[in-house]
Amino acid sequence: MSTLRGRGTVQGLPEWDRCAVMGVVNVTPDSFSDGGRWFGTTAAIKHGLDLVAQGADLVDVGGESTRPGASRVDASEELRRVVPVVRGLAAEGVTVSVDTMRAEVAEEAVAAGAALVNDVSGGLADPDMVPVVAAAGAPFVVMHWRGFSESMNSRAVYGDVVAEVVRELRERMDAVVAGGVAPERIVIDPGLGFAKDAGHDLALVAHLDELRALGRPLLVAASRKRFLGHVLAGDGAAPPPARERDAATAAISALSAHAGAWAVRVHEVRATADAVRVARAVEGAA
């Protein structure tokens, strides 16, 4: 089976003939990557539309930073940030994902037009999340997660990171399905950078085939993350700033597409859109 045919499809979402590109819109003042550049409804909607024009297939809207050490915002503020942006992008025909750990935000975002719920906790942070997603019939990203941003670095302890992430994701998938979410609507995400150090992230990227063996489409979200900064800096040097890691991100996008990922989540879309199309052309020529 070719990697193209083996990517899988997600019930309730469009089908693409290659690895899809998910563009990121952070409606936050404290994102590690964007630094509040799109903090505001009008700016965020415009940015989302710009990402689509640059080649994004879907746009992931989030109102709460999940960078290491970040504090949580309250639900009312997250709703205020996210829902108008989701509504505005959906009204323009954009396929929108909502990046949230709160069931209330997911429910209102889906009502406003979001087509996918991307929960970095895989439904663990809010016990109401899985029932809400199941009732809405929404596709759901189940990410590998071991705790909130304040404490996740201390949880980056593994004997065999690939085997443990696969096992924990399988257990979480089973729990989500038992909670009423259709298996055909589940996407899995290894959670690069979440309770993982650079070596863990690289090992997971090197073994995406073992994650795909879980039988569900795979989302890879490596964009601008710390492990890329460490790779670029080399031993003992200071990592470059997040926005100087886009070429490295595109390299991961090409590798992920070649390994059969369903989608990659990125901040800078154009280079990754080119990368996944080149990967698709190479697949087609094999």
Image (cartoon, rainbow, N blue to C red):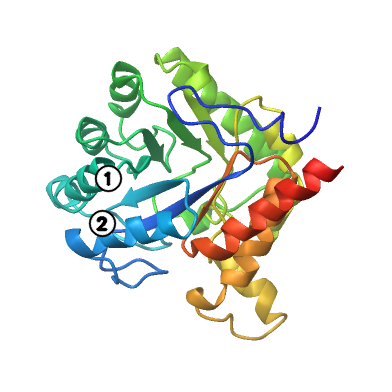
- Circle 2: is it few (<14), some (14-19), or many (20+) Cα within 10 Å? many
Where, by quadrant of the figure, is residue 113 drawn? top left
Instruction: Please give left or right for residue 12 compared with residue 255 in the image.
Output: left
Residue 74 percent location from the top left of the image: 17, 50
Determine the residue positioned at 28% across, 23% down: 132
Please name the residue that numbered disc 2 is placed on.
Answer: 45
Q: Amino acid at mark 1?
A: Glu
Which residue sits furthest bottom? 237
Nearer the observer, 195 or 99: 99
| Viewer-nearest of discs 2 and 1 | 1
Find the distance from the CA under tag 2 to the CA under tag 1: 10 Å
Nearer the observer, 232 or 160: 232
Closer to the N terminus: mark 2 or mark 1? 2
Residue 269 percent location from the top left of the image: 50, 61
Number of residue marks:
2
Q: Does the image show residue 168?
A: yes
Instruction: Please give left or right for residue 207 compared with residue 22 in the image.
Output: right
Q: Secondary structure at mark 1?
A: loop
CB atoms of marks 2 and 1 within 8 Å: yes
Determine the residue positioned at 63% across, 36% down: 17
Q: Which mark is residue 92?
A: 1
- Circle 1: is it few (<14), some (14-19), or many (20+) Cα within 10 Å? few
Q: Which mark is residue 134?
A: none
Residue 167 percent location from the top left of the image: 65, 30
Q: Secondary structure at mark 2?
A: helix
